Image: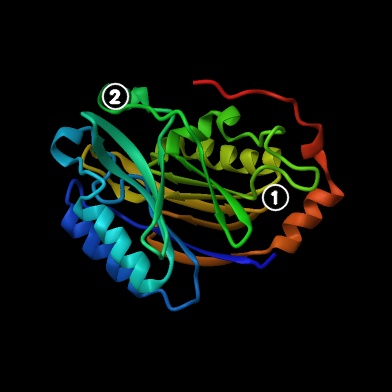
Amino acid sequence: MPNLTITTIQTNLSWEDKAANLRMLEAKINAIEEHTEIVVLPEMFSTGFSMRPQLLAETMDGATVNWMKRMAVSRRIIITGSIIIKEEDKFYNRLIWMLPTGDYGIYNKRHLFAYSGEDQHYTAGNKRLIASVKGWKINLQVCYDLRFPVWARQSPAASTATAPEYDVLIYVANWPEKRNHAWKTLLCARAIENQCYVIGLNRVGYDGNNIYHSGNSLVISPLGEVLYHMADEEDIFTITLEKEILNEVRTKFPFWKDADGFNLSK
């Protein structure tokens, strides 16, 4: 199976200013010179982590989804990140997995951050999204989901005799600096317990509520080793994930075969 190249964009966001954020992100994506296959953007990348979906929500035919489609098609890349979506009179913190064909997958954030009132404004999802790229399986999740390991856990029922359910776990986030120790610790834990690569992409800077985000974006190996870490600064980082290393870890340490069985419920 071929290797997989992923670019993360750790950036500040203009508060509730879609046009400014899309202009900024388009410039950053167009500035990527290395070959890449997937570009990862933060949670609510067009607005910041806002609790005003009535004002900011779009439909799946809206400007931001069309922007993602245009960028993915023109650059021949996959783009992923979450935005505020309205659907059937409900609001979702929705991650979109936009393919270079213009097709897409969606994941509605399962765990809503009640501490900030997210659960009062948005509807929780109940279905995981595991995408496939070049034979790699990628589990896509959003921010607060990180605190709930069962939601990310490799499913023995979905695994095969030769490989676990997925190979890469991606979190897009607006994770405050005050709790960055939990962020860094849990990302490493998810990699170790699921024997997969983990990518945690967080924003930097102050949001409209004067909450500071330190980034601390990470790429972690299937053994829990930190391959990339950046704090406090904007950064565009490209890394190639090696399938040979992933297979070697899982073959040498086949802990995934001993996992407990379980069923995810709504």
The image position of residue 124, as x and y in percent, is: 38, 27
The image position of residue 233, as x and y in percent, is: 39, 59
The colour scheme is: rainbow
Specify the label residue 222 is tagged with.
Answer: 1
Q: CA distance from mark 2 to mark 1?
A: 34 Å
The image position of residue 224, as x and y in percent, is: 68, 47
* Near-viewer residue (167 or 159): 159
Q: Residue at x 40, y 64 (%)?
A: 101
Q: Residue at x 48, y 32 (%)?
A: 127
Badge 1 crowding class, 10 Å Cα cut-off, few under 14, some 14 to 19, many 20 or more, is many
Amino acid residing under circle 1: Pro
Check contact, mark 2 vs mark 1: CB within 8 A. Answer: no
Relative to 86, say whether 120 is above or below: above
Relative to 262, say whether 134 is above or below: below
Task: Count the marks.
Answer: 2
* Near-viewer residue (183 or 243): 243
Q: Residue furthest left?
A: 55
**Secondary element at tag 1:** loop
Q: Residue at x 25, y 58 (%)?
A: 66
Relative to 73, say whether 232 is above or below: above
Please give the residue where the numbered disc 2 appears in the rendered image: 117
The image quadrant that residue 231 belongs to is bottom left
